[in-house]
Image (tube, rainbow, N blue to C red):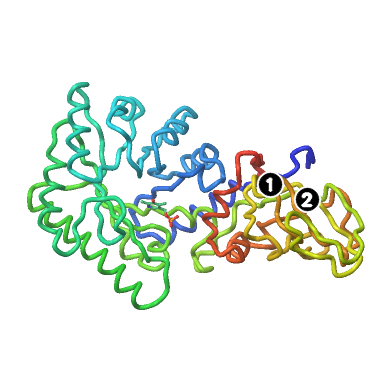
Amino acid sequence: MDLRKRTWAEISLDNIEHNYRAIRAALPEGCKFLGVVKADAYGHGAVEVSRRLEAAGADYLAVSCLDEAAELRAAGIGTPILILGHTPREYVKELIDLDLTQTVTCEAKAIEYSREAAALGRTLRIHIKVDTGMSRLGFLTAAGHFEQGIENIVSACRQKNLDPEGIYTHFAVSDEPGEDAQTFTRGQFALFLRVIDAVSRAGISFRIRHCANSGAVVNYPETALDMARPGILLYGFGDGGKLGLRPCMRLMTHVSTIKYIDAGLPVSYGGTFLTPRRTRMGVIPIGYADGLFRSLSNKCSFVTESGPAPQRGRICMDMCMIDLTELPGVNLESLIEIFGEKQSAEALAGKAGTISYELLCSVSKRVPRVYVD
Ligand SMILES: *Cc1c(COP(=O)(O)O)cnc(C)c1O
């Protein structure tokens, strides 16, 4: 490994493809597959991951915004792409030129998009987003909002120069254990079906109905409908071991400096760690600007070839310290795994009080992605 890279993320596209196939095998026959590659494919590199998914046969991709979609089109990705978030109406021409599918979350946006598309004499492909309980984006349809919600969806779909190809909703607790989460998720799904049914009675049908995120693919396979929409599963997490998924990112660094520090000396900003004995301290060139959360300071270990090395003192912007006193075999330039194979991203994220998603997509631009297979 070229140590000038200081810290790097090894990405296995073979493992992405393995996960893709494992997820597909868990889906009903004929169910389409949308791979969620927003946030640079959860930090794994959107272009590389999308190329691999396209070659493997994914039917659709999803990103959060126009810039992310444009990056994929510029790289030659031809698979249909759904933009999950908002795009301002000024960009309708670009959406159509790039053959993108735009989410529509309320009637007012449908009207704006329709006007822009009509002025261009062209048609914008859209998916209707229904809010069935996430209380984030989408046409409100819960409880007292149902009738008005249906009316608004029908109106949105009837706007000229829009092609309502799909309709979808998003589950809030499909990955949570417990009966309450089950009841809530089943309620969301039932409401989604009722919405589709009511809209179809007004003569509007959709070619692609979708709602299954990763949690639902694993826990509620009956919600797959026409297309599943997993993200984190592709990157190897969220199946609780059921699908045999493999992690795809290994965050690596190396020991850049070693020094012996006498007992009783404070380490790093704030002096939050005092050496309890003469300590063989390693400095590793990774810090919070690389995506290593400062909240992990003094709370985690990183993995050396001879075992785990406890992290000591505050994690700085560009580096941090690890205790090598018990690991005499670890030397300058020895490799250190932050997470990946021997320490899972999920376990390390847990120590920071967060989830694998956040740890993965926080690995910053400064960290080169190295595709290992
Ligand atoms: C991010 C996202 C997904 C993927 O979620 P996972 O939990 O990673 O499977 C699916 N649908 C929507 C609307 C999303 O925003």
Question: Is 70 drawn above or below residue 61 in the view shown?
Answer: above
Amino acid at the residue labelled 1: Met
Residue named by callout 2: 284
Question: Is 96 drawn above or below residue 332 in the view shown?
Answer: above
Amino acid at the residue labelled 2: Ile
Quadrant of the drawing holding the C terminus: top right
Spot occupied by residue 258 in the image (x, y as percentages of width and height): 88, 52
- What is the crowding at mark 1: few (fewer than 14 residues within 10 Å), some, or many (at least 20)? some
Q: Residue furthest front?
A: 270
Which is nearer the eye, 275 or 98? 275
Q: Describe residue 342's horizontal placement relative to residue 234 as left or right.
A: right
Q: Earlier in the sequence, mark 1 or mark 2?
A: 2
Seen at 17% across and 25% down, the residue is 118
Seen at 65% across and 57% down, the residue is 340
Q: Describe residue 196's horizontal placement relative to residue 55 as left or right.
A: left
Residue named by callout 1: 317
Spot occupied by residue 344 in the image (x, y as percentages of width and height): 63, 62
Seen at 74% across and 54% down, the residue is 269
